[in-house]
Image (cartoon, rainbow, N blue to C red):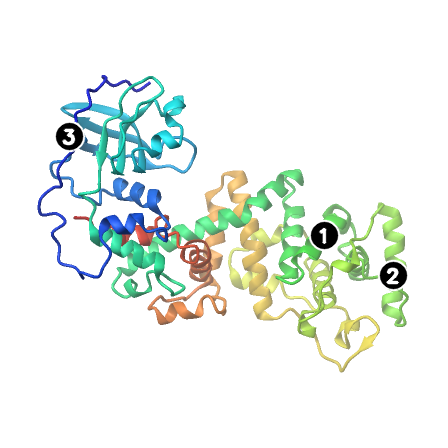
Amino acid sequence: MFLHPKLSPLAWRCAPHHGFLNVVRDPAAPSTHDLLQDPAFPYGEDLLQFIWEAQLFDRHGLRTVDGRPVEVIHAGRIQRDAGPDLRDARVRIDGQEWAGTVEVHVRSSEWIQHGHQHDPAYENVALHVVYEHDAEVRTVGGRVLPTVELLPRVSTSSLNLFVGLMRGRGEVPCAAHLPAAGPERFHTWLESVLVERLVRRTTAAEELYGLLQRDSAALAWHLLCRAFGQRANAEPFAMLAHALPWSVLRRVRDDAFRVEALVFGQAGLLQVDFVDEHPRRLQAEHRALARLHGLRPAPVAAWTFGRLRPAAFPTVRLAQLAALVARIRGDLTDLAAAPDVPTLRRLLQADPSAYWTTHYRFDHATPARPKPLGAATVDQLIINAVVPLLFVLGRARGEQALRDRAIALLEQLPPEHNAVLSPWAARGVVVDSAARGQALLELQRHYCTPRRCLSCGFGRHLLRATRP
């Protein structure tokens, strides 16, 4: 446990350090004090934590509020779990070195408001860092905390930049800074964000892998189903994967007709009276297979047809899925073994049965038109099924090569074309692969839009550039 001699608080406070805040700025601009008191300022304590961690303040002649010299050996690392704000800090106070944690508040009195004086978890705090010191505070053991006040030391350029990022109206807060930024630094951050996206998006798949008794083929089936559903029908396709276990489907995968019967039957789309012979034959075959394997169909009401192009109707997608399963014939883990994108594109080519040449839905004939999986759809299957499969298997088995191959596939694929990615090119950011596109999607949605600039590697770099 961290121990510190009891301090005798002095009645005076450190005077502002001369010259540091004497900067030339717009007289109409808000003062440093006003910025942190503004109710619209969204990151009071978080910003102060970053300012301390990055040492974005004048460190010359740093002292505690009772006048003892402070040398920061290591400011600590911000942590988001319960307990003090920064871990692994090392500071030298009045010549004596201390190791422990750092707690940050806008005002000293918030220590008392938050009840830290009654919490043993805060006994190990080595230093209390505040914007404004307004109260003496103690730990649960009665130790008076050494406190550093940042009010006279915080750089106005750091605060003005941060407020500009927070209040900017554009979708990307730092857009004006991108052209001047080093492309290599931005690229490195995007690589990290891409891995973060893959981890976030495969968390549920990792849990599912465990529930499936670590059956990689069954996991591939679930991921493939959800990917076929795309945005409109992802959930109904996921329900189909549960309603039709791979252990059952694999027994008939060499028979395209029986595969189609199981897929449509378990999707709940064979529970009406049909006119056409093909769906009636599918219906009869499904009844026999369902009785044999004890299957219950998924609810038909879940499927969405509205606002979809006919080529994207779930009936067409189900026919393509059935054709793909029958065509692969081997095991779905063949997808994980494919070495590159061209091989996967060949594996994922599938033409539905002849009935679907003249149909988008059962009993509704249309002019003849083949309905193979399109090139863009195949690439989406690689992005949303094969890449997560490789990443999950790589993490579960501890095989970095599988995770690297997942990222390599994204680097080989072209980027998506959507409203989120299009504006990045105008900002000077090259979107030349699905890997870059996926990283930018993650950056936009989970950093830029919620204004998490203090958690963004690039935003932190910009703020660090204001270091005095």
Q: Note whether 180 is above or below 68 in the view shown.
A: below
Name which of mark 2 and mark 1 comes first in the sequence.
Answer: 1
Observer-side mark, 2 or 1, equals 1
Q: In which quarter of the image is residue 94?
A: top left
**Does residue 323 appear left or right of residue 93 in this picture?**
right
Give neighbour class at mark 2: few <14, some 14-19, many 20+ (Cα, 10 Å).
many
Residue lying farthest bottom? Answer: 367
**Does residue 279 appear left or right of residue 137 in this picture?**
right
Label 3, label 2: how many angstroms apart (C-alpha)?
88 Å
Q: Is mark 1 on a helix, strand or loop?
A: helix
Q: According to the image, label 3 marks what residue?
A: 12
Q: Note whether 362 is above or below 61 in the view shown.
A: below
Q: Residue 76 carries which label?
A: none
Q: Note whether 142 is above or below 211 in the view shown.
A: above
Closer to the camera in the image, 69 or 396: 69
Q: Which mark is residue 239?
A: 1
Q: Residue 283 carries which label?
A: 2
Closer to the camera in the image, 429 or 381: 429
Whether pointer 2 and pointer 1 mark residues with C-beta atoms closer than 8 Å, the reply is: no
Whether pointer 3 and pointer 1 mark residues with C-beta atoms closer than 8 Å, the reply is: no
Observer-side mark, 3 or 1, equals 3
Identify which residue is drawn at 50% across, 67% down. 416
User: Which quadrant, please, contains the N terminus?
Assistant: top left
Give x and y (percent) for residue 305: 72, 68
Q: In which quarter of the image is residue 259?
A: bottom right
The amino acid beneath tag 2 is Gln
Name which of mark 3 and mark 1 comes first in the sequence.
Answer: 3
Label 2, label 1: how many angstroms apart (C-alpha)?
19 Å
